[in-house]
Amino acid sequence: MIKKYELELGGRVFEFEFGKIANLADGAVTIKVDDTVLLVTACARDEAMDVDFLPLTVEVQEKSYAAGKMPGGFFKREGRPSEQAILNCRLVDRPLRPLFPKNYHNDTQIAITVLSTDLELPYSSMGILGASMALMVSDIPFSEPVGACEIGYVDGELIVNPTYEQLETSELHLTVAGTSEAIMMVEAGAKFVSEELLLEALELAQENNVKMAELQKKIIQDIGKDKNIIEEVAIDPVINDKLIDSSSKKLIDLYDKGLAKSELSEEKSKLIDELSKNIDAEENPDILAKIKDEISSLEKNIVRNRIIDKGIRPDNRKSDEIRDLESEVGVLPRVHGSSIFRRGDTQALGTVTLASLSEKQKLDFLSPLTEKTFMLHYNFPPYSVGESGRFMTSRREQGHGALAERAIKPVLPSEEDWPYAMRVVSDILSSNGSTSMASVCAGILSLMDGGVPIKETVAGIAMGLILNPDGKYAILTDIQGLEDHLGDMDFKVAGSKSGVTALQMDIKVKGVTPKILSEALEQAKKARMDIIDHMESTLPEPREEVSEFAPKTVKIKIPTDKIGMVIGSGGSTIKEIVSDFDVTIDISDDGTVSIGGVESERIDNAIERIQSIIKDVEVGDVYQGKVVKLMDFGAFVNILPGKDGLVHISEISDERVDSVESAYEVGQEVEVIVKKIDSQKRIDLSARVEKYQSGELSLEESSPKKFDKSRSNSKRKSVRKNNPKPPTLRN
């Protein structure tokens, strides 16, 4: 039976349809908003896997046909997921995961397929809605419906579910997911918005989320399946009460000492080995694994209770205290900008590479965005946590890089003011919490070291939460790895002194209140200011010059009707310039030409060549030309790139010339003067330069311009006096 439901949010009608397609999935729904259509399915295996985590995967499939596009590449079919698709996978996963039963270990997959898009409305929040609905109507044990919406801020007004066009000028792009009771997930990019505005936007988003959650409750009553029951499995502890007491005392003693991460890990291993000797291994197989689990559970309770009841963190910091900071710039000699930023045991290496605009990233996914000039790539090698393993780019790494990129982007100069493509790489050297926010700090410092004129210094901080069942909680500034692992929230906030530029919140509990988020934002603001002060003590402002190893870029403006002349037939002219001077050239539709290269002299020469190409030939101009073709009646001479003129046989010399071949040969350089330009722009030249310059011979009166004797230079003069100078080199 086909069932349809509707709900209006933000002036748009959301249509939900069940029972028409994909009916063999455990749960399926199609969502339609205007001309954007998503199919979302949920499937789970009947048997549990032998794991101690939730094996949930989310797959987003962007079909090229959805936008009427042909896939790129030789095979003309979709390949690996785009970065946008991967980020949307993470966006959907995060609010759903905490709402599954703790002991649910069945392999579960959410598949989101974009069937149609008008490229007007982002589909991110629609994917979260669809995933929740597909799970809720299925028999998969998923506890509460989740609503999701996006918020923009344009012209002083908060907008629900903004379009791509509105987001171009929006000061905020906020995605919020939540149940009818609490907020589950927050993701945002912003242009220096205040904490107060963020809270207002969060409340507006949650109002809409509640409406969507209530609709889902009605749908469940109509067509929802009975949920599979996941029974709690009682596990008898292998550590008796006496050993638990003694182990607790030892763990508390370890934390009182404020040991480093490595030292604490070593001491816990000794404790586990000691406990294993007191337990009969034959009666308890996998004894070490069971002891580790019970010690971890014991440790979690100890750490959480110490924080809540005594305000004591594992490293003895106060709740609002940042770990010690250290930063350095200019650490690598040949890169265009570099830095090392350390916060506690977390350390990030930031590097920046500058390139011409031709190196900007080309994007191919379901979005109006087709290219970008700034990229931030995040790498998390195994050695950063003292392990060996594969070096690969995971979804986590792409997500962390995207967050740091979003945090930095608002302070970058415009393409018009700074004609460079920029790539920042954050290599995590050691990790003990909040590496993405360390990447923001390292990235900013490397950009400043590279001479990029950023508008403001941006810093990031990760906030944590310990929330007890009785409602008591503690908000923690600058969480380390253990606090992230044992805590209930990872709330990342980045921004400048002017306001917030990025947010991301993940939780492990069934939601947090706006009150908690408000307190976390204020606490994060104080920490952010302290970190910015530290960073600016290392490098107060961007360097005035780019590195001597960085390319230089100069912009000039040419008439739009001359663009074709610079490009040439099949790109021949511009390719020749690029080859001759070892530069890069980008030409915009408005006539802006960006010339980039490592050597300023080569850039100058390329500019001179371009200006010679677009220069209008005028009667009386004198050129040093090259003979390109011989005819019985004269010789054709190239005076400018793409511009030839005819020297008639009678104009080769003051003396009689019997044949052109006797006077000229192809490739010969000759000095000529423009004698006439006819109505068809054909150029008549003469080699009798001195006669015309002295006035002994007269230039054609039909010519557009009379000869000016002041222009008597025998060779073409440079026209560079109004050119902008390239950036000064830094030694």
Image (tube, helix red, strand yellow):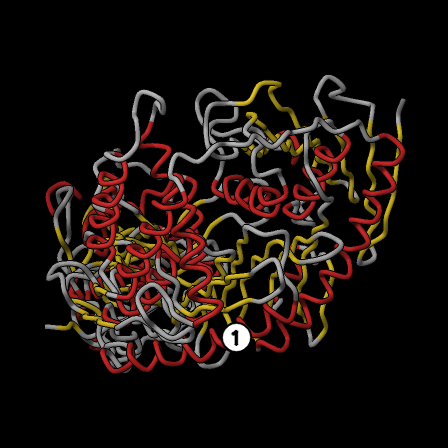
Q: Examine the rendering and report whether any part of residue 359 can be seen.
A: yes
Task: Please state, as top left, top right, bottom left or bottom right, where the C terminus lies in the image.
Answer: bottom left
Q: Is residue 290 left or right of residue 729?
A: right
Q: What residue type is labelled 1?
A: Phe
Q: Tell me: residue 217, above or below residue 515.
A: above
Q: Examine the rendering and report whether any part of residue 559 can be seen.
A: no
Q: Tell me: residue 79, above or below residue 119.
A: above
Instruction: Give the camera-side residue of 280 and 323.
Output: 280
Q: Where is residue 690 in the image (x, y as percent from the top left)?
A: 17, 70
Question: Secondary structure beneath disc 1?
Answer: strand
What residue is rendered at 32% in x and 29% in y? 287
Q: Where is residue 385 in the image (x, y as percent from the top left)?
A: 25, 47
Displayed quadrant of residue 709? bottom left
Q: Where is residue 677 in the image (x, y as percent from the top left)?
A: 39, 60
Q: In this view, does 530 lie to the left or right of 469?
A: left
Instruction: Give the camera-side residue of 532 and 433.
Output: 433
Q: Tell me: residue 475, above or below residue 145.
A: below
Displayed quadrant of residue 339? bottom left
Residue with the mark numbered 1: 192
